[in-house]
Image (cartoon, coloured by chain):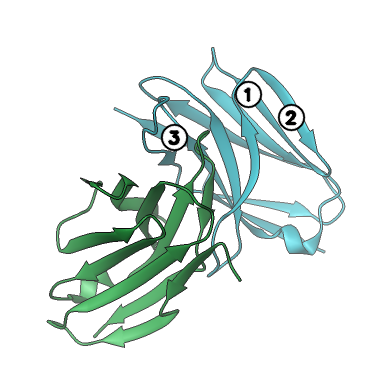
Chain colours: A green, B cyan
Amino acid sequence: DADVTQTPRNRITKTGKRIMLECSQTKGHDRMYWYRQDPGLGLQLIYYSFDVKDINKGEISDGYSVSRQAQAKFSLSLESAIPNQTALYFCATSDDRGGYTFGSGTRLTVV
Amino acid sequence: GQNIDQPTEMTATEGAIVQINCTYQTSGFNGLFWYQQHAGEAPTFLSYNVLDGLEEKGRFSSFLSRSKGYSYLLLKELQMKDSASYLCAVRPYTGGFKTIFGAGTRLFVKA
């Protein structure tokens, strides 16, 4: 099993729909992150959590929300999807020195 | 502000050596990371530097100069499978502060 598992791997949804992306990890790390990646823009931080009771906004949190259900689970929701949220989404965990382990990504298309 | 600069694209020949540079300006420094990312896949950890000098790991080496805010990733004996994006990332502080990613350098290895 992968250390960081994201579901779904691919999703096409319509504008205005609510969608949830799920992430679970077996690394035992407290720190978890959600990033989006657009061509040429690199990784942009959406939300991050340093433990179960800690949630922080990243650079581009508008239009997104998260839930840290347990140490191992961190889900990302788009409350009302819009086409410019079409992107590749990555969940990640980090160890104490800051090294990241990424999930395989979710390719989301909003039509 | 916090900024990481690296070239957008590079091309090199199979069997050759290539050096990918990264410069950074961040408020504090607590480690620099290099990740490899194949198209459509998750970034994977390559190297970590926190002290000045060269870290070697097989065909890949990474160098850091903290006084110059500069790092490079050196890839030797290039193989076609090395065609990927290479992300430079800096962790500004201790205590779990989030990592900043560069936009990545897309490397094309030609025969």
Q: Which of label 1 and label 3 is nearer to you?
A: 1
For image coordinates 81% across by 58% down, the residue present is: B79
Eyeballing the image, is A94 above or below A22? above
Secondary structure of the residue carrying tag 2 is: strand
Closest to the observer, B101 or B85: B101
* Quadrant in which residue A21 is drawn: bottom left
Q: Which mark is residue B64?
A: 1
Q: Which mark is residue B4?
A: 3
Decide if residue B92 is on the left or right side of residue B78: left
Eyeballing the image, is B103 above or below A25? above
Secondary structure of the residue carrying tag 3 is: strand
Dot 1 amino acid type: Leu
Dot 2 amino acid type: Glu
User: Are the residues tagged 1 and 2 within 8 Å (C-beta)?
Assistant: yes
Residue B81 seen in render: yes
Dot 3 amino acid type: Ile
N-terminal of the pair, mark 1 or mark 3, is 3
From the image, tell me which residue sits under label 2. B55
* Label 1 environment density (alpha carbons within 10 Å; few <14, some 14–19, many ≥20): many
